[in-house]
Image: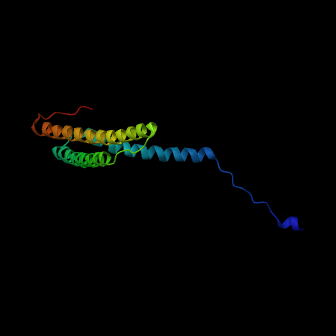
Amino acid sequence: MENENLETPKLETTNNSEQEKSIAIEEKNANSNSNISLNSAISQPPSVLRCILGAVVSAAIAFVLWNFTQTIAATFAAKQITSDNMIVIRVSVAVRTLVIGMITLGTGVFGLAAVGLFGLGLQTLFGKPTKLEN
């Protein structure tokens, strides 16, 4: 009698292929919506305001990184490596060089982007209007 009261729960079996199809359709719709906005942004010519604003933001980031580079270089110069072990000295010098190099690389990238965007803004402002071809 006790066995009659205990029923095994029945698991609902769903068709996994239907779920996968609905997920794929949802992903496709989401991707197509993002592609539409991306295509409309690409087809518009750059405006002078966007170029100059981008140049100002990029130059500000480059300036902050340059000041950060100078601060770190001064800190590294003030704190000498004190060790008798040559391996420790060489690894410390390599890490310091890597840190300064990476920050300087970021500074250069943002600085060149600022110059390029400013030049594009000038070209857009004073250049001949051109038509975009699709």
State which quadrant residue 1 falls in: bottom right
Residue 16 in picture, x, y percent from top left: 62, 46
Residue 121 in picture, x, y percent from top left: 16, 40
How has the structure been colored for display?
Answer: rainbow
Q: Is residue 17 left or right of residue 30?
A: right
Q: Please give the name of the residue rendered at 14% of the width and 38% of the height, measured from the top-left corner.
A: 124
Residue ranking furthest to the front: 84
Residue ranking furthest to the right: 1
Vertical comparison of 132 with 1: above or below:
above
Residue ranking furthest to the top: 133
Q: How many marks?
A: 0
Q: In this view, does 115 lie to the left or right of 42?
A: left
Q: Which quadrant is the C terminus positioned in? A: top left
Q: Is residue 11 left or right of residue 107?
A: right
State which quadrant residue 130 falls in: top left
Q: Please give the name of the residue rendered at 58% of the width and 48% of the height, measured from the top-left corner.
A: 19
Residue 17 in picture, x, y percent from top left: 61, 43
Residue 26 in picture, x, y percent from top left: 48, 47
In front of the other: 82 or 38 = 82
In front of the other: 116 or 122 = 116
